[in-house]
Image (tube, rainbow, N blue to C red):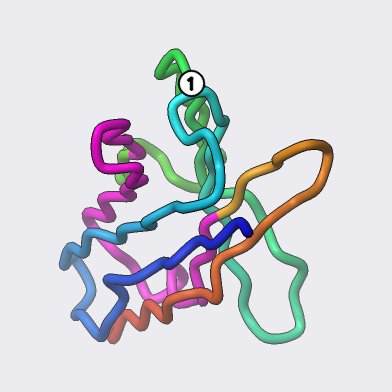
């Protein structure tokens, strides 16, 4: 059974930082491409960043160098460092992977940025 536990969200002021974590089980983590998505009410879920098994990363244009995705294969854990947060970054952030052709999601962690 695949299980993704995403944690680390919270309330921060504009310009602040957070680190999100996603602990994975039931997947061969070290060979899996992992990603972070986010969603706000009334909008579609959008990809924030992705990291391949070899460590190659891609970011959404709106990240603008402020976020960093990383992974620790020994701990089966994915991270997303959020710096220079803006109120527009307020959303629920989800960890995601595709395994045997099926998408799996964490339950999400709320990030709220106050002005």
Give me the residue at 49% from left, 67% from top: 93
Q: Is residue 105 left or right of residue 9?
A: right
Residue at image coords 44%, 52%: 24
Using residue 96 as the reference point, say whether residue 30 is left or right of it.
Answer: left
In the picture provided, is 115 more to the left or to the right than 50? left
Left or right: residue 77 compared with residue 47: left
Image position of 114 with respect to 39: above or below = below
- Relative to 66, does residue 28 appear above or below in the rendering? above
The residue sitting at 50% across, 76% down in the picture is 91
Provide the residue span drawn in magenta.
69-95
Q: In the current view of this chain or complex, which residue is farthest to the right?
A: 101
- Snapshot quadrant of residue 106: bottom right
Whether the magenta-drawn stretch holds residue 34 is answered as no
The percent coordinates of residue 19 (x first, y second) are 23, 59
Of residues 3 and 66, which is closer to you in this image?
Answer: 3
Residue 71 among those drawn in magenta: yes
How far across and down, in percent of the image, does residue 35 sit? 54, 44
Rendering coords of residue 114 (x, y %) = 29, 86
Quadrant into which the N terminus falls: bottom right
Residue indicated by mark 1: 53
Task: Say above or below: 102 vs 100.
Answer: below
């Amino acid at each position: 059974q695949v299980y993704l536990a995403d944690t680390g969200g919270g309330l921060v002021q504009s310009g602040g930082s957070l680190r999100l974590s996603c602990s994975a089980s039931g997947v061969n983590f070290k060979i899996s491409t992992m990603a972070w998505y986010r969603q706000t009410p009334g909008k579609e879920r959008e990809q924030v960043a992705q990291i391949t098994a070899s460590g190659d990363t891609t970011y959404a244009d709106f990240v603008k160098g402020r976020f960093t995705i990383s992974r620790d294969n020994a701990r089966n854990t994915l991270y997303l460092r959020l710096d220079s947060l803006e109120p527009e970054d307020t959303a629920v952030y989800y960890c995601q992977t595709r395994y045997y052709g099926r998408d799996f999601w964490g339950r999400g962690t709320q990030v709220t940025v106050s002005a």
